[in-house]
Image: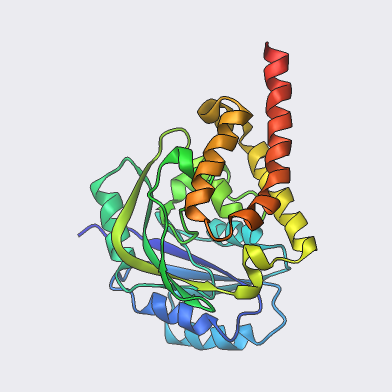
Amino acid sequence: MNSPLVSVIMPVYNRAHLISESLDSVLRQSYDNWECIIVDDGSIDAIKSVVNEYLKKDDRFQYYYKANGGAAAARNYGIQRSEGVYILPLDSDDIVNSNYMEKAVACFENNSNLKLVYGQAELIGDKTGKWNLPPYSFKLFLIYNMLFNSSMYKRSDFDRVGGYTEGNRFEDWDIWIKILKPDGKVFQIPEVVYYYRTHTSNSITNLLDTEKELYEESMGQLYQNHMDTYISVFGNPIDLERERRALYSKVHSANYKKAERILNSSLFQLGLQLRRMFKRNS
């Protein structure tokens, strides 16, 4: 039986109190051929002592320490040291179901055209329940990221697109766009395979003013990184704004006005850039 290696990439920063749940979920996988690369991104808590117990328990775990540089840098660092055919990112406070690897690998092995495999998800932590992600389409995806960060993809695609863009908080969204454009195939496993830990203090509607500014800057950077893609799909800023309003009114009906305040400045910047480009080309 073909059993390609899966590289689980886990960046961690001060999660000594939560990482055991994540590592245990890796140990419980029905799929055996994996390596788990833990990248300590400059933690100052007891994370190393916790991880050491897992290093003793199973030699498929690996631990690296690096100076703090953010999640994207840590993921790039870990993947560069990995040997797997497939990459499964996993944050150090989230959990994967025991059959996730097995099902995701089978999807890839049965369809060589796939670029990304994910599944249904549930929320744990401060907020619990089903995570109601909209069905995937590339057009909607450019406005709303319905693909969680623990989606499995090919190492060859990581190499092809140059890895995660460092210095942007939407590093997952950014790399998915790079991998999927213009018509990459995505498959969603029709069952819950992933459990995302929520932290109320970090939700969009509870961001501090300084965090909101960073959020807006990151959205603006995402648009700038993929300006050609947004232009090819939406054509002009008016169509982009119309699509965004329609989607967010459905997905974020309760928090629409708050989300509106956060996102508007980035979209305005995008509109200005697009209008300038159209004017130059007219």
Residue 128 relative to residue 101: left or right? right
Evaluate whether residue 47 shows in this view.
yes
Q: Is residue 47 above or below residue 75?
A: below
What is the residue that sits farthest to the right in this orientation?
A: 210
Q: Is residue 137 above or below residue 166?
A: above
Residue 105 relative to residue 217: left or right? left
What is the residue that sits farthest to the top in this orientation?
A: 282
Residue in the foreground of this view, choosing between 227 and 257: 257
Q: Quadrant of residue 184?
A: top left
Q: Position of residue 5 (x, y in %)?
A: 36, 61
Residue in the foreground of this view, choosing between 169 and 260: 260
Residue at position x 32%, y 74% from top? 98
Residue at position x 54%, y 29% from top? 234
Report how many numbered discs are placed on residues in the image. Answer: 0
Q: Position of residue 69 (x, y in %)?
A: 72, 62
Q: Position of residue 29 (x, y in %)?
A: 33, 74
Q: Is residue 65 above or below residue 141?
A: below
Q: Position of residue 279 (x, y in %)?
A: 72, 16
Evaluate whether residue 180 shows in this view.
no
Residue in the foreground of this view, choosing between 203 and 111: 203
The N terminus: image quadrant: bottom left
State the colouring used for the structure image: rainbow
Residue 262 relative to residue 54: left or right? right
Residue in the foreground of this view, choosing between 268 and 230: 268
The C terminus: image quadrant: top right
What is the residue that sits farthest to the left in this orientation?
A: 1
